[in-house]
Amino acid sequence: MAPPPKKFAPKTNLYVWEGTDKKGSRLTGETRATNVAMARADLRRQGVNPLKIRKKATSIFSSRKKKISSGDIAIFSRQLATMMAAGVPLVQAFEIVGRGHENPSMQELILSVKGDVEGGTSLADSLRKHPLHFDDLFVNLVRAGEHAGVLEDLLHKIATYKEKTESIKAKIKKAMFYPVAVIAVAVIVTAIIMIFVIPQFESLFQGFGADLPAFTRVVVNIAHVVQDWWWAILFIAIGLGYLFSYTWKRSRAFRQNVDRILLKVPVIGVILHKSSIARFARTLSTMSAAGVPLVEALESVSGATGNVIYSDAVLRMREDVATGQSLQLAMKQRNLFPNMVIQMVSIGEESGSLDDMLAKVADFYEEQVDNAVDAMSSLMEPMIMVILGTLIGGLVIAMYLPIFKMGSAVMGGH
């Protein structure tokens, strides 16, 4: 049986219009529609008599579509939840949020979902048509809210979950960005010294007619290699980066090995452990509060941990729970979760308040991630300065050693 044809969202354009309201007052504004006729019909539905409608001229920069980020989805979730809490009907909420978004790609996505909902498709099924932006976890929570008649509450839970998850991601990215940026600057500065500065010193040294110190000779020889083969070094670096990215996307075994190594790295490994536990607890808490069955929830949770090792462990826990085992026992057998987390889950299972206990675990570990990131930043700053000082200082010393040696010889001659 052939799969159903993929449905593409119609392309929309931005139109500038002038018109009058029912009282004859002059109005102007902008609207997004597939063509002029649709824009005119949309304005008339809003009680506006359109007099002039023209396509808005856009510059190269304003017309360029930006990629939809997970942060955009988090903001959209909160806006939609707020609109529904204010009593705005779902379709109208999509209209307001969609047309008010600055990212044209996000506008098209929201208005496409709105069109499906207007056509009678459930919100969950409408979102499922866009798996790149709305994952199984998002869709399952929306479906649970629709079935239970508590979509507004579930949208608030989804928004909170997305905001917390994005916050953790931002903290980890912040922790990684500083050392990477400093190392990149160090590499660029070193390359400039090797290619442009050292040759000037080398021509100066040749006029001395004396043997260079061993350290200086080593640095000069390295500089020759960089000058002659910089293009090959650059090509190899880019090739290795591409190979890593290609293998990461296509090999789960490779991701397992990388994640396993990262979890064992001092300081960074601790942050990744705590981050995965926080995301596990936050996701499972949200799904449990929504009334999603535990076995079904664990399948979605496995993809939200952000680490393949934890993801595989959650899938094995799901198999254990499906055979009747308690969640806390399944967690204990994985040897990944701290005893405190297991005990909190055990209390939650016994008291019937698993979602509350997991929310407390998530709050605790999110705070732990914050503290660990701050501690790592404080620890890495002096370490990076020492490395930079040693690297740049070593090059400077290597260049000035012959001058010091010559100065000593001259002083000794006197």
Image: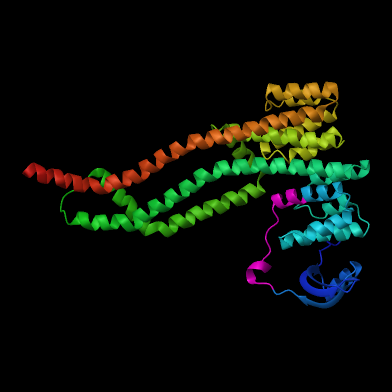
In depth, the one of 19 and 25 nearer the eye is: 25
At horizontal 44% and vertical 40% (from top left) the residue drawn is 384
Left or right: 341 as drawn, with respect to 262: right
Left or right: 284 as drawn, with respect to 167: right
Q: Which quadrant is home to the C terminus?
A: top left
Instruction: Please state the horizontal and vertical placement of residue 7, each as a whole percent of the image.
Output: 84, 62
Report the colour scheme. Answer: rainbow
Choose top left, top right, bottom left or bottom right for residue 390.
top left
Answer yes or no: is residue 1 visible: no
367 up-or-down from 126: above or below: above
Instruction: Please state the horizontal and vertical placement of residue 392, each as a whole percent of the image.
Output: 35, 46
Can residue 62 be found in the magenta stretch? yes
At horizontal 28% and vertical 46% (from top left) the residue drawn is 398
Answer yes or no: is residue 400 visible: yes
Can you name the residue that lies furthest to the left here? Answer: 414
Choose top left, top right, bottom left or bottom right for residue 405.
top left
Instruction: Please give the count of numbered marks on the rendered protein.
Output: 0
253 up-or-down from 55: above or below: above
Instruction: Please state the horizontal and vertical placement of residue 292, each as a whole percent of the image.
Output: 86, 37
15 up-or-down from 154: above or below: below
Choose top left, top right, bottom left or bottom right for residue 37.
bottom right
Q: Magenta segment, which residues?
A: 58-76
Left or right: 53 as drawn, with respect to 41: left
119 up-or-down from 266: above or below: below
At horizontal 88% and vertical 56% (from top left) the residue drawn is 91
Can residue 90 be found in the magenta stretch? no
At horizontal 92% and vertical 60% (from top left) the residue drawn is 119
Left or right: 216 as drawn, with respect to 35: left
Instruction: Please state the horizontal and vertical placement of residue 83, each as a whole percent of the image.
Output: 83, 50
In depth, the one of 277 and 54 nearer the eye is: 54
